[in-house]
Amino acid sequence: MVRVHIWLRRKEGMSPEDFADYWLKRHAPIARDGYPGLKGYTVDLVTKVPGGGEAPYDGIAVLTWDTREEFSADMKSDVAARATEDMQSFTSASGLLFVEEHVVK
């Protein structure tokens, strides 16, 4: 399984509520409906930072594919270009990490 974590920081001046609304209702459907190899897609929104600090990001997307080939094919598609372009509508920064999950409990 290929597991990707993408962290996003909301665009300057955008409220957390507007950021979440845009991501979930406008941006997420691009990948959800457009990547044929995509097996899973979850969004985790930051709701609070202990001690009142500032979060380094406002949310994390976790996307999964069965194989590296399916991931690569989806990333070469017009859908990937459209999703990347759309991120400019609601984010000021982002990053992508490949991760390996280990269930501890």
Image (cartoon, rainbow, N blue to C red):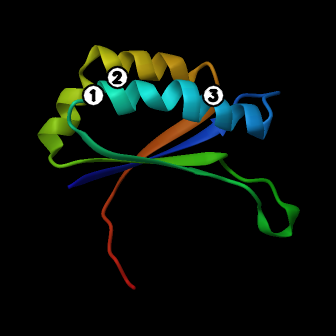
Which numbered disc flags the more N-terminal residue, 1 or 3?
Answer: 3
Q: Give the numbered dot on residue 80.
A: 2
Callout 2: few (<14), some (14-19), or many (20+) C-alpha neighbours within 10 Å? some
Amino acid of disc 3: Tyr
Quadrant in which residue 50 is drawn: bottom right
Q: Give the numbered dot on residue 22.
A: 3
Callout 1: few (<14), some (14-19), or many (20+) C-alpha neighbours within 10 Å? some
Q: In the displayed image of the protein, which residue is found farthest to the right?
A: 52
Which numbered disc flags the more N-terminal residue, 2 or 3?
Answer: 3
Quadrant in which residue 16 is drawn: top right
Secondary element type, mark 1: helix
Which numbered disc flags the more N-terminal residue, 2 or 1?
Answer: 1
Residue at the spot 50% in from the left edge and 41% down from the top edge: 95
Secondary element type, mark 2: helix
Q: x%, y% of residue 47?
A: 73, 55
Q: CA distance from mark 1 to mark 3?
A: 22 Å
Q: Quadrant of the N terminus?
A: bottom left
Q: x%, y% of residue 17?
A: 76, 38
Q: Quadrant of the C terminus?
A: bottom left
Amino acid of disc 1: Met
Q: x%, y% of residue 88?
A: 59, 20
Residue at the spot 87% in from the left edge and 62% down from the top edge: 52
- State the residue position of label 1: 75
Q: x%, y% of residue 99?
A: 34, 58
Residue at the spot 71% in from the left edge and 28% down from the top edge: 11
Asked whether the residues under the numbered discs 2 and 1 touch, taking CB atoms below 8 Å apart as contact, a structural biologist would say yes
Residue at the spot 14% in from the left edge and 47% down from the top edge: 67
Q: In the displayed structure, does residue 70 sit left or right of residue 79?
A: left
Pair 2/3: label in front: 3
Callout 3: few (<14), some (14-19), or many (20+) C-alpha neighbours within 10 Å? some
